[in-house]
Image (spheres, rainbow, N blue to C red):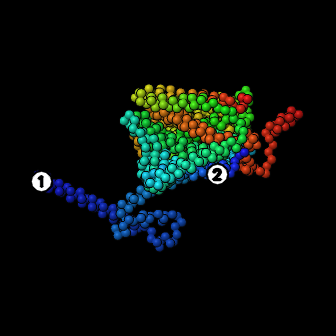
Amino acid sequence: MAANKQQGFSFGLFLLGLTAACAGVSCFSIGIGKVILLLGIVVLLASLWQFFKIKPLEGKIALGSQPAGMKLVGVVVTLLGWVVVLFGLHLTPNVGGRMVAAIVGLIVSLVGVLVILPSACNKNAIWKA
Amino acid sequence: MKIFRSKFLLYLVLVLSIGTLAHADSTADLKATAAKAPTTADLQQGDPGGTLTGTINDVPVSDPKAGLTLGDVANQVGQNKIGINFTWTLVCGFLVMFMQAGFAMVEAGLCRVKNANHTYMMNFSVYACGLFAYWIIGFAIQMGGSAGNGNLGGLQPLSGEHALSIFGKTWGIFGEKGLFLSGHTYDVGVMVIFLFQMVFMDTALTIVTGACAERWKFLTFCVSSVLMGAFTYPIFANWAWGGGWLAQLGNNVGLGKGYSDFAGSGVVHAVGGLTALAVALIIGPRIGKFNRDGSSNPIIGHDISAVLIGCFILAFGWFGFNPGSTLGASAAGCLRIGSVAVNTMLAGCTGTFGAMIYMWALKGKPDASMSGNGLLAGLVAITAPSGFVNTVGAAIIGAIAGVLVCLSVSFVENRLKVDDPVGAISVHGACGLWGVLSVGLFADGKSNYGGSWNGVTGSVTGLFYGDASQLVAQLIGIATLVGFVFTFSFVLNWVLDIILGHRVSAESEVAGLDLPEMGQLGYPEFVFTPEPAYLGAAERAAAVA
């Protein structure tokens, strides 16, 4: 099953919820802003629940399972590289030191992006079957 | 003391007299000029040569009793400067908006016939998804604290930036003014900057549709695009352009002029390209793209003419993308718009050559689709440095991008085993990062946008012209793109995959997305012969001959 009325309704609900939530944020200082924000969040959650309910209607997809643990490791390593770069800013005041920290951090992130995550996502790829 | 007081009084009287005389002189000058201006009777005769239209009589007078004053003239000069800058920025924004058509043609042309409607529709509706999300919250996050732009009248309503204080320095994180463009942000200057920034944001969003074409569920594409326009793009864009911490690297820790990205190789293209990589990893390759041994199969696009015409539309729109980023054509270095435009053209030209000659020399044919990607690669790469480099630097940057895109396409497909139907990850991700880096190398220190950049006095200067610290600022920007933006996009889309699912069913994918997802074929009156049978017939015919 592909595009259908339930999808259209859910997307409309999602847009409504997001708009209401943002409107609530926009007038948060006024009393009614908090009410609108709460209403928006409720509608948004309702739309996400709708999405989740109709997901199985799509049917069988051509995608193998992707190990969540390995993906999580990849995400953490990628983020860690960025943290190394930020830390390096304060570790040393000289340009050379900061350049080394930036390059080291970037390499760590690239290991996550180019090695760990592709391995995780392709571990049970359909073309391997 | 008496003598001193007398001399002082005499001096005061002299100065006041000279001032009064000067004022009287200028007022007399204005009156004399007004007296000589064409009258209504003169204008009623018509003005074919344009010598009578546009005179002192067109300057608004604030006080009819006092008549025209120097103050009135000065006010008009100010209005003219802002008017010129508004018009320039808006027209450039209109050009960038038209790039959506170029992206649609390039992507659909590189996809199969059975997915044409769906691919065009993704590029069409990304405009609505992005604009809406940006209006309700994205613009506020990105530009909510960016007050101070003299080119557009100051943008003073945008005066709310949330910042963190770390190690005694203030680092901007996100803005808060401008949701729904309401309240004080209902302002003429804010409207101009909103339009201009919105079309840039939409370019980033549309990049993802190319990498995920032919198997992306339309519903999930819509939700993902809305969230990218609301959060992913604006967060990094605030850090680079909205008064955020990346731009403050120069002021706070002395790294050059801070992260410098003139028109968005990083902010737009790398954000788009890296998000495309994140979603492509999650969504998986198309059925039939890879064999069991890991080798890849080419899946040929259905319309190369659309691809190449789309590339030219993009190149045309890029004249709004880069030169428009001066945010004006009057004052504060804005006359560099010609230089920026020429740099843009040159990089596109050498990018084309880089890709074309690489493919021709190594593979034997000047591949059309890769040549088109080469043009785009050059344009993407020059986007960040376009305002800071000379023509030689621009040509080199473009040529390297043209070769880089070919290498990257092969790497992404054969090493990473990521299926990217249009090469979006390579064109925008890899070449976008190269563009960011090239600022730190090739910026020649000759540009002057009001005497400073990101609040640091002087011109952006790269390593080859004497400032290594600028290169470090750019590297930190690249590390933020790879380490933070990619991660944010990956996690966001991972959650969407759990809740909605990114991929269409195998049945829909094999049939083509046009009917299941859109309910209508892209070319309903045409019957297309499947590619393998066609090739088989041609080969059979050649063997018989």
Q: Nearer the viewer, residue B115 or A44?
A: A44
Q: Nearer the viewer, residue B450 or B295?
A: B295
Placement of A98 over or under B508, stated as above or below: above
Q: Nearer the viewer, mark 1 or mark 2?
A: 2
Residue beneath disc 1: B3
Disc 2 secondary structure class: helix
Residue at 38% from the left image edge and 65% from the top image edge: B62
Q: Mark 1: few, some, or many residues within 10 Å (few <14, many ≥20)?
A: few
Residue B541: where, in percent of width, then height?
Answer: 86, 36
- CA–CA distance in space, label 1 to label 2: 91 Å
How many numbered marks have been drawn onto this rendered protein structure?
2
Quarter the C terminus of chain B occupies: top right
The chain holding disc 2 is: A
Name the quadrant containing residue B29: bottom left
Residue A18: where, in percent of width, then height?
Answer: 55, 49
The chain holding disc 1 is: B
Residue beneath disc 2: A9
